Amino acid sequence: MPNKHLYRILFTILMVVSFHAMATFTNAGVSAAGTGYEIKLDLNVRIPMRDGAILSADIYRPDTAGKFPVILLRTPYSNNSKRILDNGLYFAEHGFVFIAQDSRGRHDSEGRFRPFVDEGRDGYDTIEWAAKQPWSNGNVGTIGGSYAGWNQWFAAVEGSEHLKTMVSIVTPPDPFLNVPYQNGAFLLGMADWMILVDARVNQELSMYDLPMLYKHLPVITMDEAAGRRVPWWREWTEHNSYDEYWKERSYQDKYDRVNVPVLHVTGWYDDDQVGALLNYAGMIKHGRSLEARRGQWLLIGPWPHAINSAQILGDIDFGPEAVIDINDVYRRWFDCHLREKGCDQVMKAAPVRIFVMGENRWRDEQEWPLSRAKFTRFYFHSQGQANTLNGDGTLSTTAPANEPSDRFSYDPSDPVPTVFVPGSFQLESTEDQRPIETRNDVLVYTSEPITEALEVTGRVRVRLWAATSAPDTDWSAKLIDVHPDGYAQRLLGGVIRARFRNSYEMPVRLKPGKPYEYEIDLWATSHVFKEKHRIRVEISSSNFPKFNSNLNTGKNNGTSMEMQMADQKIFHDAKYPSHIILPVVPRPR
C-alpha cells in the first residue's frame, strides 16, 4: 500500500517534474546535429501586452542576417531551465527562432497569475509581437505540453493570422473534463499544483506531509492547511459543476475559430490523454477551414504524462521501439508548416501513428477511432460474491440471465487507495492492482484465460447498473490485463460522480435504492491481451487520493465535511446487464 514517503515522492515528481518538464516537450537522450547556425541569445526580453503588462521571454535565434520562422513556448514553470535551454539551442541550430516566455505573474513576467484566464490574450499578443520582429518571417508555430498545451489552445482560438501550426503535447481537455475535475470528481493532486504555483516562483513541496494534506477537510481550505491563501483554489472548489465559471475557461467549444494544422501527442498512460483524442476529433469535424480539418495528426506512444521518457513503465518493459527521436518529429513538422520544407514526406505519412502495447510495435493508421474495431460487450457475472480477488466474479461475452447483485459498503473515511509505481511521473500507470483487490469494497470480474491473442484498440466504456443508499456517490472502474503469473496490470481507469450522470451542468441527486445506468468513460488504449492472459474489470466507489472521496451526502464535496456510509449494489442480470465495451480489432490471419 502507498506510504507517506511514496506519496511525497510521487506527487512531488508528478506536479513539479511532469508538469514542468513536459511543458518543455523534450525527450531524454535524443539529439540531432545542427545545420551549422551560430546562435544568438536574447534573454529577459520584455514584451508588452495590450493592457500594459510586460512579460519576459528568452529568445534563441540564428546569429545571422535573414528572417526565420518562430516557435513559441509559453510556460508558468519558468523559462529559465536546462531543458528549455537545450531545446532552444536545438531549434535555433536548425534555423528557427525559439521563444520561451514566462506566463503572466510567473517568474520574470509582470502581473498576477490566474490559471486559464489571461493565457489566450497574452498568447495572441506574443504571437503578433513575434511575427513583426526583424528576424521573423511572420510565420509562428507553438509548442508545449500540459499547461503549456492549454496555453496554445487558448491563444489559437483568438485567431491570429500569423499562427500557422501547433504541436500540442499531453494537453488536458476543458477543465471540468479532466483537470481539476474529472467527470465531477476533484483531482486531489491539484493541491500540489496549487502550492507549486502560489506566488511568483515555483514553491517547495518537500516541507509538507502530503498524505495528511490530502485527508484535510473541507477541500476548499487545503490552501490554508498548507499555510497559504489562494483565491482561485477556493473558486475551483466552490464551482463544482460545469457553470459559467468553467465555460469561460474552456476552449473545446471553439474549434471553429482554430485555423491551423495540429500535431497531437499523448500516451496510453497519460493522465491527460483524453485531451488529445478530443482535440484531434474535434478539429477534424469543426476546424475553421478545410485545410485545418485535413491537417490533424495524432501520435500516441506507450507513455505516461512524461512522454517518450523511457521504455519501462513500472514493471512493464515496452521494448526498444518505445522511445523515439521525437525532437526530429517536431522539427520536420515545423519545417513543413512554417517554411514549406519537406511537406511531401510529412503530409504523405499516415495521419495516425499508434504504439500497440503487448505486441510492442508502432502501427500507422488512416483514422481514429478505427472503423474496423468491433465494439464487444463483456458482461459481469457472479452469484453475489464478486468482492475481492478471491470472489466469484467472472467476465464473459454471454449476456446474464437471472443473477443476484453484488454488494459492498463504501466508507468515505476509508477509501480505496490509489496504487502508485515510484518514478512513473503519473497518478496511475501499469501498477499491479492485487494489493487493493483484497478489499471487500472492490468488486472483481475476471474472464477465463484468453485462447487466442485479442487486440483492444479504441475507446473503452463501462455501462454500469447500480444503486446506492446515498443521495450521491462515486463509481470507479478499471480495465486490467491479468498475466499468467497473476500480475494485474492496470490499463485504464475512470470515474463518475453519480449526480453528474446526465449532465455536468445540471447535477441531480439520486433516489436511494433506485437502479440507475451509468457510463464510465475509461478513455482509450491499444493493447493486445496475449494467449493465457485474462481480462479483468474492477468496480469500486473510490480511488484516493487520485480523486477526493465522495462524502455521499449530495452536498459539495469540496466545501463540506459531513459524510455518511453508502450501501452499494451492482446489478448484472437480464434487466440490468452491467458490462464493459471493448473495441476488438480483428487480428491478421
Image: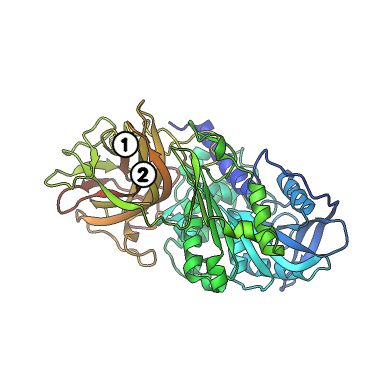
Please identify the quarter of the rendering in which residue 436 is found.
top left
**400 shown above or below 171:** above
Residue flagged by tag 2: what amino acid is it? Arg
Is 561 positioned to the left or the right of 200 in the image?
left
Closer to the chain start, of discs 1 and 2, is 1
Q: Position of residue 490 (x, y in %)?
A: 41, 38
**315 shown above or below 274:** above
Disc 2: which residue: 587
Is 357 positioned to the left or the right of 589 in the image?
right
Q: Position of residue 410 (x, y in %)?
A: 30, 43
Disc 1: which residue: 452
Q: Secondary structure at mark 1?
A: loop
Whether residue 488 can be seen here: yes
Please identify the quarter of the rendering in which residue 336 is found.
bottom right
The one of 82 and 279 positioned closer to us in this rendering: 279
Q: What is the count of numbered marks? A: 2
Q: Secondary structure at mark 2?
A: loop
Residue drawn at x 42%, y 39% as measured from the top left: 418
The one of 351 and 116 positioned closer to us in this rendering: 351
The one of 526 and 339 positioned closer to us in this rendering: 339
Residue drawn at x 35%, y 42% as measured from the top left: 589
